Each structure stands twice: as structure tokens, then as C-alpha cells.
Image: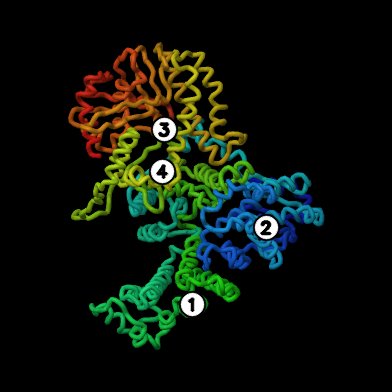
Amino acid sequence: MKTKIDQIIQHFLLSQKTNLNQKYILISKEPSVIEYIKNNYKSKFSSETRFFTIVKFFEKISGLQILDNHFILLHFFSLLKKDDFLDENFNSFFNWGPKILNDFQNIDINMIDVERFFSSMISTEKMKKWNFNILEKKNFFLGKIHESYYILQSKLLKKGITYQGMLFKIALSRLDFFLSKNFNTKILLFIDLILNQCEKIFVQKVIQHNHGFVYNLYEKKIPKNIFGSEIRNRNKIDKTQVFEVSKEIEQVKIVENIVCKLVKKGKKPCNILLIPGDNSLLIPLLHSIKKLGIKISINIDYSLKNIPIYYTFYSIFQLLLKKDKFKKFTKKDVIRVLSNGYIQKFFLKKNSFLKKLKIENNLDLISEDIIKKYLFKNELWILFQIPTHNTKIILLSLIGFIRKIKEQLLKNMNKHFLELRFIFKLEVYIQKLRIIVRKKKDLFYGGINEVFNIYEKFVNTESIRYIRKNRSGLYITGFKDLFLKNFDVAIITSFNEGVLPPKNHEYSLIPFDIRKRLKIKDFNNDIYFSHFMRILQFSSERYLIYKNQPDEINSGEKSRFIYQMEINSKIPTKKINNPFIPINFIRFPIVIEKTKSIIHRLHELMSQGFSPSSIHLYNYNPLLFYYKKILSLDETKETSFKKEVGRVIHQILKILYSPIKESFITINRIHEMKRISESIVKKVLLGKEKIIEGKYMLFYFIVKTYIDNLISWDEKCIQNGHKIFVKKIECKVSTILNIGSKQVNLHGIIDRIDEYDGIPRILDYKIGSYKKKEMNVSLINIENIFQDPNYGNTMQLLIYVYLWFKSSIFFGEEKISPTIGIVSPEKNGEILQIPINFFHKKKEILHMKITEKNFYHFLLKEFQKF
């Protein structure tokens, strides 16, 4: 990146050497780019030359200043009235308020016609989607949000403050005036791959007015298809290793081992880039690397919730919440507050009360009088006497305590840099909140509960910039942060779907159909996609680590970026399985008793039908089976990236192959499918959209590669003299199983049934690659197929074979026993049929007698569990 910037500036200086006294304005989207140019080339320009980021430049020409979203949110709240709320408190505002503000941002940044947007939203059908039972009165959404958009902007303009989308929109409206007034000033604008609509208009205006020069820092550097099959790109991707772990702590250990080995081999730490996908791992990673004696250089956004002093305030809130509930303090909460490291260090160096509490066994609840006896003269007493029902006094007391702890932290500013940043932000925020409470007394009834909710929202979404520079140190930065130098090695942790890229659906109330119709673009996926391409381009070797077990943070699914690389390149994945569980650890099973209602529901399911996926779900996660099938709970998680890709691929293959059902695949038909495949892929993926970019670009490459390779796989078979007669595509099959007095409807959808050189063949499409080139089933492991979730795909195909023989749609046909196989991409993307061999015999054809004798018994046994 530095080389590219140097080339641009040096070429410009050379071409303009006779005119360097002219005034220039140099602008970049990224602060690090403009900082580098200013530090290295400021002396080459006239003294009147100015250097800005786009945001700072827009602030200058608009006369506005960007405020943090949290403070904009408080201004937004101050506009609302009591009648705007469902109940008598405003806790719910901090659930839906940020989403509405984020939607305002999207409307402005995409330059959407505001009146058209709200007229689209104001319909009964759309209101149902947008309401989410947040507010009782529909007229709030019908009129209040529309009205609030203009009132909020008017209020912010009067105060000279703004949010980013509003800033960009207003600055563009004043840009022509600025350019005409400064017609002798030339603009040098440095841009990157992804531009929002406002930035695109800015670029166009600079070019159209012949007012300067626009330079793309990534031009001819990153091809659109960096995952493509070209050798130069494949070499880039091939120098990548993937690590799969089950525990968070294992990621830290892997990073430590990788860094240790690299340094021992002579790699300089300053040439190693470490990117924590989830910043909650930052502190463990820092300790782990420091333990190796390696210096660190860091430049990253750090969540307030990950700063240790957060837990000091969290424990104080828990103390007060319990006081509000029980009217006394719980011993556990008092001990937790008094044992806190910061409390001990600054306020409780010599106090016998904590020791007494730990020894005393007959106290569960402690009165305020007992606390007063020991802490009355201590500065902590301010916390224990907070009235939990009075929001105004709660905030005043918290501000008082914040100032006391800030006074202590300021005594050693270098050591307590992070804590002070936390305290400063929290103090300003609570001060702003206190002012609103004073003005809006009628809206605050929740006391400590609502203050705690506001605090949690603030620390969960707010961050600080943590910068510690060391030229010789290992460099740690965020995934979206720009780095100017090239690195020998890049290590990325938490490379999971839902983390990289993160889920973004929770931050908007605008339905998808309106987003699509009004072209309200979500740049989040595009940004992460472009940053990943940049990391690939500017690093020679990469280590990607992801966690395969789901939890409240991530899905347990590897990122879509890894899937794409695996399709096009041979990337090794190393599974680390070192669970940190004691040998004598005892797991207690979750037992759900079969009540009459559960048995009744199971009978309903038997009648409706079980598919192989239902059986697999029961084996893989019985509790999830209970939630989804018995309780009929809607799945709250969005469809995984892998499932979505699989769904799209199946849909496209059905469109391509359905016209040749009941006929042979010929070379002419292959050529026709190749000719139309691209247009069908685009149609299914994009609908009416014409441009493939961002998320759709990644989808497109994955899907198009799979479709092309599968068609080529059929083509090779035909060219080698084989005959393929397509019988069925996406074939629905079912039969009835008699289990005692009960009947079970067994059903499924077979991806493809064809005849390969006259022998029926049942194929199942899978988008994931398999390490094994063939699968073997012996008499020993037959039972495991129907019990072990690792055999899910084999079980699925065996059930399909049984349905092939038993299903009514094949009655009247001559039943020739079929072969079965999984169609899956290899690491290089080429399609491979993975045969399933039975009883150590290659290409075993499954006769009906073999199926019933060896498999039917275990299938019945599986259903008897229900």
C-alpha cells in the first residue's frame, strides 16, 4: 500500500512541478492514508495545502460536527413525548431507538428520497413487519418516525452537530458552492474499493467540475475474482492454512504456537499481522504474546465491555439490583464489590469488614445499617446508600463515584490509560443522561433497572481506539482497519460465519423487500469482502482459525470466505481437539419425560412424515429436535451461509437439468447448459439487480464454480464413452413403515436419479468437500449409521435407496438395483463422485433383499425410540 501511495504522489509531483505553489486539498477515506501522506510529503506542497479525511472535509464545508451515535440517540429521545410510548418507562426505546437511527443513517447515506421511503413504509402490510410489537400505537410509525426524522435533523442543525449519514447528505448539498468559491484549489482524492452512494457522488462532482484528481489505491491490485482459477491468484490462496478448534482458549494457544515457530525460524515480529476476529480474545492474545517476550504494536477498536473496570461497575449494578429486589444487600454481592481489584486498591486497603463477611456464615442478607457501621467514613458509602427507585439520585451518585475513581486513576495515567478512557466516556454519557432525566421526569419510573439497561446498551456497543506503536513489534489490528505495509504472515482468529462477516440484520427495522425496491444498500458485507481481499493481497502467508462449536457469540460455522477458498484451492484444515475438561468431569444428561401431550405430538409427526434430516437432527441434537419438532418453536437463527448456498445451487441445477429429464445427456445439451448457466445463476441470485458486488460477488463465485464444475463432470463422463439417462430431478419419494400398531410416513427428496450405463444411480449433491475419496460400510458399523450423526449423509442415501424400492411413484417400473454416491467438490473445485461401498465390495449394487436384511431392521429400531 505504501508503495502505491508513493508512486501516485511522486508521479503527481513530477507532473505538477511547475505548479506546486497552487493550493491543494488532499483527501482520503482512511485516516492512516492521509496521515502517511501528510507526514512524508507535506513539505513538497505549498504551505496552504490542507490534508483531510472525507469525514473531516465534509465537516469543514458543512460547518457541522459528528457526534457519537449514543449522544445522537439521547438527542433523539429528548424529542419524544410520553404519548409516544407503550408503557410508562422508556427502556424499550433503547431497543428500537438505535435501529431507527441506523435506518435514518441508511436513508441518508444511500441518498434515498425520504418521502418515497415513508410512503412505502406506511401501508398496513409493511406496518405489521416494521412494528414488531415494540409500540402499541401504529400512528407512531405512521407519523411520528416520519416527523421525528425532520425534527431530529432540524434540532441537530441548530446545535451544529450531526450523525454521519446526515453529514454526508448536507455536505454534498453545499459542495458545489464550496467548489465555485475555491475554484483555484485542486482536490487530490484517494479512494478504495467500496464507496457508499454519497462518496460516489462526491467523486463524480470532483471529476465533472474538473476540480482535481481521483486515485483508486486498489486499482490493478485486487482483481474482482481473487478466488478465481488463475494461477497467480491460486498461489496466493494456497499459502493459507485453516485451523478448526472447539474451545476459545485453543485459538489463543494456536496463535502462540504459530508466532513462536515463526520467530524461531527468523521471522521478524514486525512482519507478522494478528487480527482478532472477535475482540474479546484481545486481552488473552496480548498476554500470550507478551509471555513469549515479543514486543507488540497495536491499533484497534476495543469494546468498553472488554476493559476490566467494566466489571467494577457491573458488580455495583448487581448489588443495587438485588437491593431493589430484596430491600437488603445480598452477602454474595457485597463480597463481590468489596473484593473487586479497583475497589481494593483505591478504597479498601485496610478494612476488616470484608474479612468478617467471608468468615460469617449465618448472613445471607445484609441491612444498610450493618454496611453503614463499617463503611460510613469510607468513600464507598455513597454506593450503598443509593435509593434504587430514584433515577435522578442514582445518576448523581454514580457521577460522584466516577469522579472519585477517576481521581485515583489520574495518579498513574500511563498505567491506567484504558480505564481512564472508559471513565471519561461513561461520565460524559451519564451527565448527558442526567440532563434529559431532569427535563423528562415523567418518562423515568424504572429506577436502577432502567439505568442498568442503559448502561449495558452503552458498554456493549461503544468502543475506544487503543493505540500503542512499536516499529519492531508484532502488529495487532482490526479486520476492517487499514494497514499500509505488506506482511509476511497474517493470522486471523474467530474466522466464523456471523463474526466475519458479522450479522447485520439486528440493526434495522426496514423489511428486505423495501430495501431491495428502494436500493437501500447494506455496505457491511461489501466492506468485509473487500477487506478480506486486501488481507489476501498484502500478506504472503495466512493462518485462519475458527471455532466449530456454537455458542452465544458465534454459530460454530466457518466463514463463507473459507468455503469459497476451499472450492478453488487445496487449503489444508487442521482440526485441534484438546478440550480443557478434567478427566473426572461428569456430564449430567438433560432428561425430558414423555408426557401424554409429547406422545400425541410424536404420533402427529409420524403421520405427517419423517425425513432423513429429521432423523439426523434427533441424532445430532435431541434437544434441538425437541424444540423444533415437538414444541414447534420457530428457529430464531438466520439461515447459515452454507445452507443458503446449497439451496441456491439445488435451485439452479433443477432449472438446468429439468428440461432433459427422461432423455440422455449429450454433448450438445452440455454446451447448451454451459451457454445459459451464467444467466440463470445471475437471475436466481440477483433477481432484477444487474451488478454483482459485495456479498453477491462471493455468492456468485461459489455457486458459478460449483455449477460449471458439475456440468464439466457430466461432460467428461460423456466424452469417455459413458451414457447417462436422466430419470428424475429433485424427486419427492415416500412410503409407509409399519411399526407395531403405528404407521410412520417416511419421505425425502432425491437430488438426482439417473441411469449410468444402464444401471440406476442415486446422487446427492453436497457443497462441502470430503477428505475421503470413498466411504465404506461394514457389518460392524451398520448400526452406527442410524445413530452416529457423523454418518448422516450415508444414512440419508440408504433411506433414499429404500424409498426407491418402496415409493409408489416407481410402481410399474422394472426395479434394477441402484448404486448410490455423494457428488462433492474436491479441494481444487473439481467435482468428484464419492462412492459408498458395502461389505468391502467395490461398487456394490444394493439389492432389495440386502437393503431389508442389513438396514431395515436398524431403521425400524430408530423409529421405535419415538
**Whether residue 9 is visible:** no
- First in sequence, mark 3 or 4: give its number: 4
Name the residue that disc number 4 marks: 558
- First in sequence, mark 2 or 4: give its number: 2
Callouts 1 and 2 close, C-beta under 8 Å: no
Name the residue that disc number 3 marks: 767
Name the residue that disc number 1 marks: 390
- Taking the image as shown, residue 143 lies to the left or right of residue 471, namely right
Q: Which of 339 and 365 is in front in this view?
A: 365
- First in sequence, mark 3 or 2: give its number: 2
Q: Position of residue 551 (x, y in %)?
A: 37, 51
Which residue type does callout 3 highlight? Ile
Mark 1 vs mark 4, foreground winner is: 1
Q: Is mark 1 on a helix, strand or loop?
A: loop
Which residue type does callout 1 highlight? Asn
Q: Name the mark on residue 167.
A: 2
- First in sequence, mark 1 or 4: give its number: 1
Which residue type does callout 2 highlight? Leu
Q: Nearer the viewer, residue 829 or 484?
A: 829
